[in-house]
Image (tube, helix red, strand yellow):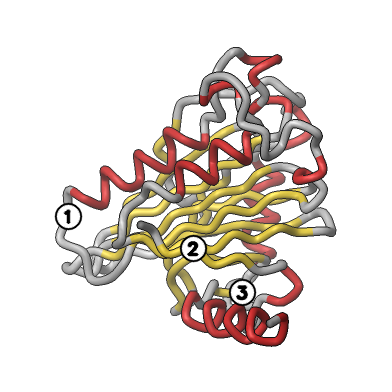
């Protein structure tokens, strides 16, 4: 069973370790205003870092990046404001890394609109498979973020019909529970918009980043345990 911790974005420990201006410049170069709600690409693209060191992923797309032992770069997305953002990071024993980022709005994940499951499911399993093909230096890490109002959908939690027909968060929750004991997962509901999710290695920092802050899975678990203890 995968190890899953849940924490609100405003409670994430740490200080920004990457310059978000890099991501903003890469976003502008991709012309993000041309992306339409609901229109989506289920396939995951291989991205390359641009002159800012960032491979930017537009809304309703997914991108992955492999880095060698001495390479730097990020795969990143921004403007998360009610959408689902998911990232994965795995460090190989040789010092190289595998990482991906996906960004999808709710409409592109709804069975009624697409007659498919959320594309994020296949991206999570894809990261698990790619990581399994290498000798790893540590656990495979994942972050799942979504607007905190999504759980108020009348369909959430019912799981009626086939898997593809469930609310997209029910699908993703099931998928992350099946990523294996080697996985570390942080679920991050967020309230405010305009958030940035990134994965990779840059400016001397590596891993998964939320608004530039590295996700520290150990600290998140400790914080969650304290919260649970206070609620007992």
What is the CA distance from the residue labelled 3 to the residue labelled 2? Answer: 19 Å
Q: Residues within 10 Å of mark 1 (few under 14, many from 20)?
A: some
- Examine the image and state in which quarter residue 68 appears: bottom left
Select label 3 or label 2 by which is in front: 2
Q: Considering the numbered disc 1 on the image, is that residue within a helix, a strand or a loop? A: loop
Residue 182, position in %: x, y? 29, 62
Q: In the rendering, which numbered label is found on residue 156?
A: none
- Please name the residue shown 73% across and 26% down the image: 107
Residue 83, position in %: x, y? 72, 42
Q: In the rendering, which numbered label is found on residue 134?
A: 1
On screen, residue 134 versus residue 205, left or right, reads left
What is the CA distance from the residue labelled 1 to the residue labelled 2? Answer: 23 Å
Residue position for label 2 = 4
Residue position for label 3 = 213
Q: Earlier in the sequence, mark 1 or mark 2?
A: 2
Give the vertical position of 217 relative to 97 (above or below).
Answer: below
Q: Earlier in the sequence, mark 3 or mark 2?
A: 2
Q: Residues within 10 Å of mark 2 (few under 14, many from 20)?
A: some
What is the CA distance from the residue labelled 3 to the residue labelled 1? Answer: 27 Å
- Please name the residue shown 64% across and 36% down the image: 104
Does the residue at mark 3 contact the one at mark 1 (Cβ under 8 Å)?
Answer: no
Residue 141, position in %: x, y? 41, 62
Which residue is at the front of the view, 61 or 13? Answer: 13
Q: Quadrant of the C terminus?
A: bottom right
Residue 139, position in %: x, y? 31, 66
């Amino acid at each position: 069973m995968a190890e899953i911790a849940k924490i609100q974005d405003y409670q994430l420990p740490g200080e920004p370790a990457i310059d978000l201006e890099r991501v903003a410049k890469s976003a502008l170069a991709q012309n993000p205003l041309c992306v339409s709600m609901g229109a989506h690409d289920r396939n995951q693209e291989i991205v390359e870092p641009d002159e800012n060191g960032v491979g930017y992923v537009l809304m309703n797309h997914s991108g992955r990046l492999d880095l060698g032992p001495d390479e730097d770069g990020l795969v990143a997305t921004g403007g998360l404001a009610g959408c689902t953002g998911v990232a994965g990071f795995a460090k190989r024993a040789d010092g190289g890394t595998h990482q991906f980022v996906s960004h999808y709005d709710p409409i592109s994940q709804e069975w009624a609109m697409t007659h498919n499951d959320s594309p994020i499911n296949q991206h999570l399993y894809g990261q698990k498979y790619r990581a399994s093909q290498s000798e790893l230096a540590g656990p495979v890490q994942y972050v799942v973020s979504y607007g905190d109002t999504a759980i108020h959908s009348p369909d959430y939690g019912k799981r009626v019909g086939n898997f593809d027909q469930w609310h997209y968060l029910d699908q993703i929750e099931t998928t992350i529970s099946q990523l294996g004991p080697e996985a570390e997962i942080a679920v991050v509901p967020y309230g405010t918009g305009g958030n940035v999710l990134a994965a990779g290695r840059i400016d001397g920092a590596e891993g998964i980043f939320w608004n530039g802050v590295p996700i520290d899975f150990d600290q998140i678990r400790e914080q969650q345990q304290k919260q649970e203890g206070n609620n007992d």
